Amino acid sequence: MERIAMTTPLVEMDGDEMTRIIWQMIKDELLLPFVDLKTEYFDLGLRNREETHDQVTHDSAEATRRLGVAVKCATITPNAARVEEYGLSQMWKSPNGTIRAALDGTVFRAPIMVRGIEPYVRTWKRPITLARHAYGDVYRNVELRVPGPGKVELVHTDADGTETRALVHEFAGPGIAQGIHNLDASITSFARASFNYALDTHQDVWFSSKDTISKTYDHRFKDIFQEVFEAEYAERFEKAGLTYFYTLIDDAVARVIRSDGGFIWACKNYDGDVMSDMVSTAFGSLAMMTSVLVSPDGVFEYEAAHGTVQRHYYRHLAGEPTSTNSVATIFAWSGALRKRGEMDGLDELVAFADALEAATIETIEAGEMTGDLAAITTIENPCKLGTLEFIQAVAGRLRARIEA
Ligand code: NAP
Ligand code: MG
């Protein structure tokens, strides 16, 4: 069989632990037999990040800027235990944080829906995509333990020394205080990324914040979204039959639960962090959640939303059988290949990505799945497969589709 040709390489970011094992299996069983895969390979595994003093992460982000599409394996974010386990010279920063900062991106997370894995919320019929702003607010905060009576103020000093002050609180006793910030430029990028992704995937956009209480801070988000929408997107949305809708976060939460899905919910950084865990769990499984980082200038980085599945990796190392779900990592590859195909006008590559996703879903819907899904499926007598067995079951169906 002739393999599908590519023109521009994908940026391939390899990673750690069980997902690194899965990465190789996916390439061997699902990609290389069918596609003449072209990638620029970066090993973001923790050992190589240590060896290169994390230069490899920066290089991979630079390559992504240059080539436009990346696919990333889950990676370890070092903590004290990992510093010891891997003998690290430093507690290297989260690769995802580094890549996000380099691309100024917004993270979109969407569940992969299959028959037999039912959302806990009965009304949800279509996926809900969560768009999380990935800059600022409480993630870049400055905190103060207030030792005793006194004033806490916010002070802005401009270039010629003029001060603008706001009293936070006149403390009569000890307490706590916190300063947070965001940037018009970053909020504008967030709004554009959300609207672009909506046009790209043909979905409405909801944006929510707490502007009734936060009359300057959250209100600025609301105003920027509205201004960007009216100036740059209103016409295109109208033509596509799509809508943009702002509502208070309290109202949004209630409407999301009552909805049947099928829209993009744009959230501020903290709201997005918390709500994406809730939404993904409510859709059935973290292992079925895809994640794509989109920069305002149209650069895409695809990955699974879950981590490196450390506990399964240690079982794998001990020679025990594993049943780790590879679906989100398969969809990271199919997402990246489809986008590459669209950008380069390669219909065959786009069709391959579609076939790969269809074969994966078909496998699960036929009752063949990994242990995490077998435990929650509504399909009777599911067949629980090992990590490699599941990927091979998908490969069989993929081959049948392609040869048909
Ligand atoms: P995790 O890797 O997502 O795994 C947590 C648990 O969720 C697993 O132990 C497993 O439960 C279940 N699970 C997650 N993905 C699964 C899959 N594909 N198939 C089957 N079960 C799955 O999170 P973690 O253990 O907290 O983190 C491990 C490492 O991943 C950490 O070093 C962290 O820094 C890193 N991490 C990376 C990313 C990223 O690169 N995007 C994201 C999150 C975490 P059972 O053990 O009960 O089967
Ligand atoms: Mg979270």
Image: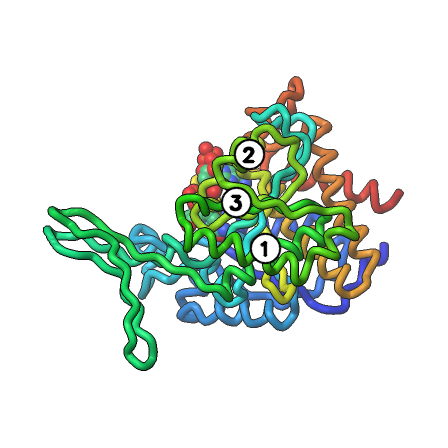
Tell us which disc is closer to us: 3 or 2.
Answer: 3
- Residue located beneath label 3 in the image: 208
Q: Residue at x 70, y 39 (%)?
A: 360
- Hey, what amino acid is under mark 3? Ser
- Residue located beneath label 1 in the image: 226
For marks 1 and 3, give the CA distance: 12 Å
- Hey, what amino acid is under mark 2? Ser
Q: Position of residue 247 (x, y in %)?
A: 55, 42
For marks 3 and 2, give the CA distance: 25 Å
SS at mark 1 in the image: helix
Q: Position of residue 65 (x, y in %)?
A: 60, 70
Q: Nearer the viewer, residue 324 or 136?
A: 136
Q: Is mark 2 within 8 Å of ligand 1?
A: yes
Q: Does residue 359 appear to the left or right of 91 in the view shown? A: right
- Residue located beneath label 2 in the image: 285
Residue 315 visible somewhere in the drawing:
no
Which is nearer the N-term, disc 1 or disc 3? 3
How many other residues sit within 10 Å of disc 3, few (<14), some (14-19) or many (≥20)? many
Asked if residue 154 is positioned above or below residue 244 in the image, the reply reads below
SS at mark 2 in the image: loop
